[in-house]
Image: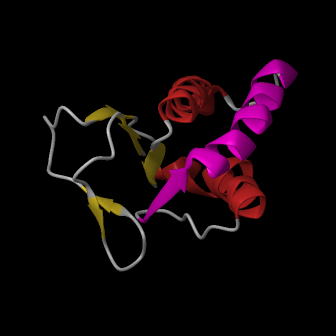
Amino acid sequence: MTLFLLLDMSQIECDEFGIPDFSEPPDPRIEETLFDIDESYMDVLEEEFYKPVNNLCGTILDMWEQEFFDKSACAKIRPWLEERLASESVPEFLIEPFKKLLEYVAKAIDLNTGVVIEG
């Protein structure tokens, strides 16, 4: 899973699916974090992350796909992540990705930008 925080949306165009099209890092307009998640966890990832986020935001994020979450979607994801992390029921392999995503959505809200998640 790769998380991209858009630091600056100026001069970033979107593709036909509304996903920002930015150059490969290093790009000063984005911050990127990669999490290497073993394929054996994909079913858990689907149940614990993709489905809940898709239900919250009306998106179709899936394995090996990209989805853009704008400021309003980040505002929906943020309390969900805070609640999940506080519950201590998050699978161990998702704790660090959830913490980083929480950091990214908070920054995106402040910057009025968004986050791209690549499953």
Q: Residue at x 46, y 52 (%)?
A: 39
Q: Whole-percent x and y of residue 73?
A: 65, 51
| Foreground pick, 107 / 116 | 107
| Farthest residue, direction bottom | 16
105 relative to 47 in the view: left or right? left
Image quarter of residue 98: top right
Image: magenta residue range:
65-87
Is 78 inside the magenta-drawn segment? yes
Q: Looking at the image, is 106 positioned above or below residue 71?
A: above
Residue 86 or residue 94, whichever sits in front: 86
Left or right of 61? Residue 37 is: left
Is residue 56 shown in magenta? Answer: no
Q: Is residue 54 above or below residue 99?
A: below
Work out which residue is located at the far front of the displayed protein and give it. 10
At which x and y percent is residue 68?
47, 57
Above or below, 72 against 81 in this view is below
The residue sitting at 46% across, 50% down in the picture is 117
69 sits to left or right of 52 = left
**Residue in view at x 62 percent, y 43 percent:** 74
In this rendered view, identify the residue nearer to me: 110 or 69: 110
- Main SS of the magenta part reads helix
Please identify the quarter of the rendering in which residue 33 is found. top left
Q: Position of residue 41 (x, y in %)?
A: 57, 48
Picture mark count: 0
Picture colour scheme: secondary structure
What is the x, y in percent for residue 107?
A: 51, 26
